[in-house]
Image (cartoon, rainbow, N blue to C red):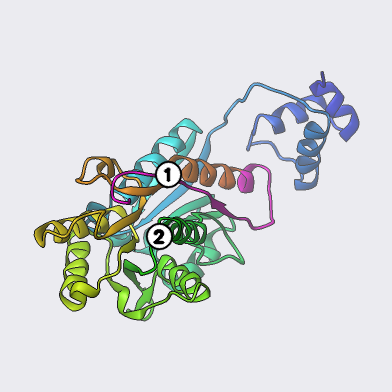
Amino acid sequence: MATIKDIAKKVGCSISTVSRVLNNDLSLSVGDETRTRIFEVAEELGYKKKTMKSLVKNIAFLYWLTDKEELEDIYFHTMRIAIERLARENNMELTTYKVADGIEKIPLNIEGFIAVGSFMDRELEYLRELTTNGVFIDSTPDAEHYDSVRPDLDQITRKTIEVLKQQGHKEIGFIGGTFQNADTNVEEMDGRERAFRKYMQQEGMLNETFIFCHHGFSVDNGYFLMSQAIERLGENMPTAFFVAADPIAVGCLQALHEKQIDVPNRVSLISVNNTSIAKYVSPPLTTFNIDIEEICKNAIHLLLEQIIEKRKVVKTLYIGSELIMRKSTI
């Protein structure tokens, strides 16, 4: 089994230096080349050590959502709680800043950041002036400069269409939210809608009249959109809908129940997120489980790689998901 002495000999530095680098001692003055070489040799020799987590200071958590947006979507609330907990577990000194604080509230001496939400171009420029170390969760607004971790919505959408086709559905609709561009204030298409349009077009099944979208991902928005679909389409409603998020799907179920439209025998629903409420509504939602814990854990690890190991190559990481079959589909 490789030892610190073996690594020191191969790298050509002291045992003390190797020990302090492997234990993430940020107070150690050592060149980036030497630090990188130590980690490379340790991996090459198969060195195993007990993890000793040094304090990583001055990390900003940019939670760029309003209180209303968090209240309406438990997905982001769960994400915030997970990031704050994982930071503590990894001995990371994390300070949370919200969109209401403004980007100028972020101190000039931050070592790095983790960010959730929508950012204006000027805010991204400001961040680039502060630090090269940063990770965005659930979006990739600056792939040239910063890492990102996000669910693979393209794969989720493709799988949804495949499953519904296998169940015999020939007419499939989409119900989802839109995002407001922070720079232009214009409502923009969500990635799930974009992917839905692409794959349905490829299958020769795209019908524009079956797509209903409006700002936000709340229960109220789902109720509003499904009510629109019922009123406009009547008996011509598709036999299935892909719904962009569980809160929207809950609102869809409410509208369908009010009109006594049977789920799943008349209309099937597949949703996204697998939030806690998904299995308790009637009928329970078929939905994709997005592992928020895994997303947040990878975000923390990517940032630590940047700060401690001095990684310079930018990474974009897509996390897969599992379809949980319940009774909202046949």
Q: Which x, y percent locates residue 321? A: 48, 47
The local secondary structure at tag 2 comes to loop
Left or right for 260, reference 72: left
Q: Nearer the viewer, residue 195 or 202?
A: 202
Q: Which x, y percent locates residue 12? A: 89, 33
Q: Can residue 315 be found in the magenta stretch?
A: yes
Q: Which mark is residue 292?
A: 1
Q: Which x, y percent locates residue 100? A: 28, 61
**Mark found first going from the N terminus, 1 or 2:** 2
| Amino acid type, residue under disc 1 in the picture | Ile
Q: Residue at x 32, y 51 (%)?
A: 329
Picture quarter containing residue 143? Answer: bottom right
The local secondary structure at tag 1 comes to helix
Left or right for 245, reference 58: left
Q: Is residue 223 above or below residue 323?
A: below
Q: How many marks?
A: 2
State the quadrant of the N terminus: top right
In this picture, which residue range is highlighted in magenta?
Answer: 305-330
Q: Which x, y percent locates residue 324? A: 39, 43
Residue at numbered disc 2 = 168
Tell me if I can see residue 114 in this picture.
Answer: yes
Q: Alpha-carbon neighbours of circle 1 within 10 Å: few (<14), some, or many (≥20)?
A: many
